[in-house]
Image (cartoon, grey):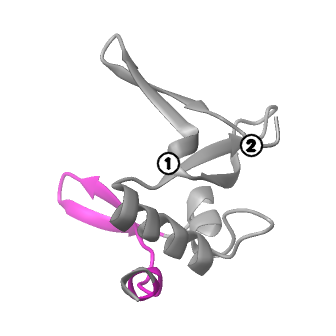
């Protein structure tokens, strides 16, 4: 129930400015977050899954899949937290995504 309620909240992309903050509406990522993070998952379902993972596992993790030629975000791939290993190397987090199908 909590996950569904949070998933129903509007998504806004906010940029910090010297004068405060402003809403960004034309960033390519906002379309993916608002409408369809991946071909098989709606925005609502993805946000519900992510929030459910946060509530039950302490983290919600998705891998950013980029277009190799342009570097633009194409989709977000959801991972169960137990399929992701995190290591800190040189004070930076490194993620290893363990696909079940590979």
Q: Which residue is mark 1?
A: 81
24 over 80 or under it: above or below? below
Q: Which residue is mark 2?
A: 100
Left or right relative to 25: residue 28: right
22 over 4 or under it: above or below? above
Closest to the observer, 53 or 61? 53
Left or right relative to 34: residue 19: left
27 over 64 or under it: above or below? below
* Residue 42 place in picture, x, y as percent: 68, 76
At horizontal 17% and vertical 59% (from top left) the residue drawn is: 19
At horizontal 36% and vertical 84% (from top left) the residue drawn is: 2
Mark 2, Cα crowd under 10 Å, few <14 / some 14-19 / many 20+, is: few
Q: Secondary structure at mark 2?
A: loop
Q: Can you say which quadrant of the picture contains the N terminus?
A: bottom left
At horizontal 38% and vertical 64% (from top left) the residue drawn is: 56
Q: Secondary structure at mark 1?
A: helix
Left or right relative to 91: residue 36: right
């Amino acid at each position: 129930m909590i996950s569904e309620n949070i998933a129903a909240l509007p998504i806004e992309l906010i940029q910090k400015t010297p004068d405060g903050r402003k809403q960004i509406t034309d960033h390519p990522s906002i379309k993916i977050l608002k409408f369809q993070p991946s071909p098989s998952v709606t925005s609502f379902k993805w946000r519900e899954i992510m929030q459910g993972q946060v509530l039950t596992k302490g983290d919600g993790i998705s891998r950013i899949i980029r277009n190799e030629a342009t570097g633009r975000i194409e989709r977000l791939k959801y991972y169960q937290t137990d399929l992701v290993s995190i290591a800190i190397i040189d004070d930076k987090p490194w993620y290893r995504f363990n696909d079940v199908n590979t």
